[in-house]
């Protein structure tokens, strides 16, 4: 198996781990009275992210893209850094992290870890990965297509998430649930 194919398959396995984590966290959130916001865009997001992985493999095969070390190695480092940032976000939010927009009423907005630095650090990881993962193997069409399709989706997602987060109290105003 080619190293790039293996990389993309490992990212796919990571996505499955995210979905398992999200399902467990959604159940926790619902037990604590959570509400979901903006579920209508979720299937589009799943389709786009699945398309990213498929596009990486298809473009490599169909366009016979070679590995170019001067581009590939820095993009691999960026893709791995995006994974690290994503899991830092997951660890920081704990059971409140989800692939859907689900908030537990009364819990304060998280302002530690990467959320101390950025309001939405996970989306920085998504944007970085959407560019870097395809470019590890020179798949510029996939990188461009994903990025252009992700921008309007990300705008919808940010509006939805910001509206949901606006329902939460300030960080110091509420006790945390265990």
Image (cartoon, rainbow, N blue to C red):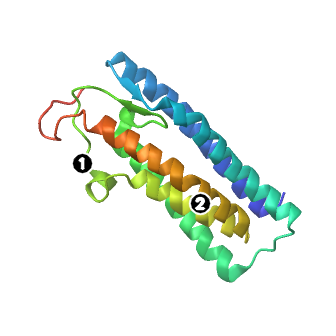
Q: Residue at x 26, y 25 (%)?
A: 105
**Quadrant showing the N terminus:** bottom right
Measured Cα–Cα span from mark 1 to mark 2:
28 Å
Q: Nearer the viewer, mark 1 or mark 2?
A: 2
Most extreme residue toward the bottom, as rendered?
70
Let me know if residue 83 appears in the view.
Answer: no
Q: Residues within 10 Å of mark 2 (few under 14, many from 20)?
A: many
**Quadrant showing the C terminus:** top left
Provide the residue designation for mark 1.
Answer: 111
Question: How many marks do you count on the picture?
Answer: 2
In the displayed structure, 159 sits above or below 144; it is above
Q: Position of residue 130 (x, y in %)?
A: 59, 59
Q: Residue at x 46, y 45 (%)?
A: 156
**Lateral position of residue 48 relative to residue 38, left or right:** right
Most extreme residue toward the left, as rendered?
173
Q: Position of residue 101 (x, y in %)?
A: 42, 34
- Front residue of 41/131: it is 41
Image quadrant in which you'd find residue 129? bottom right
SS state under label 1: loop
Q: What mark, if any, has residue 147 been given in the picture?
A: 2
- Front residue of 64/157: it is 157
SS state under label 2: helix
Image quadrant in which you'd find residue 26? top left
Let me know if residue 155 appears in the view.
Answer: yes
Q: Are marks 1 and 2 in contact (CB under 8 Å)?
A: no
Q: Earlier in the sequence, mark 1 or mark 2?
A: 1
**Lateral position of residue 7 relative to residue 107, left or right:** right
Q: Position of residue 47 (x, y in %)?
A: 66, 41
Q: Residues within 10 Å of mark 1 (few under 14, many from 20)?
A: some
Q: Residue at x 40, y 47 (%)?
A: 158
In the displayed structure, 137 sits above or below 155; it is below
């Amino acid at each position: 198996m080619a190293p790039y194919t293996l990389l993309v398959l490992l990212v796919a396995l990571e996505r499955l781990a995210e979905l398992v984590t999200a399902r467990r966290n959604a159940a926790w959130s619902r037990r604590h009275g959570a509400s979901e916001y903006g579920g209508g865009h979720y299937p589009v997001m799943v389709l786009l992210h699945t398309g990213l992985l498929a596009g990486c493999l298809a473009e490599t095969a169909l366009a016979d893209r070679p590995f170019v070390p001067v581009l590939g190695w820095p993009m691999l480092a960026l893709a791995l850094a995006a994974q690290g940032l994503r899991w830092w976000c997951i660890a920081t939010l704990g059971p409140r992290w989800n692939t859907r927009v689900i908030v537990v009423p009364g819990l304060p907005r998280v302002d530690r870890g990467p959320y101390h630095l950025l309001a939405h650090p996970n989306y920085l990881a998504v944007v970085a990965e959407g560019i870097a993962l395809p470019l590890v193997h020179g798949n510029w069409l996939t990188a461009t297509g994903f990025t252009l399709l992700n921008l309007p989706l990300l705008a919808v997602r940010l509006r939805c998430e910001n509206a949901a987060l606006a329902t939460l109290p300030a960080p110091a105003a509420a006790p945390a649930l265990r």
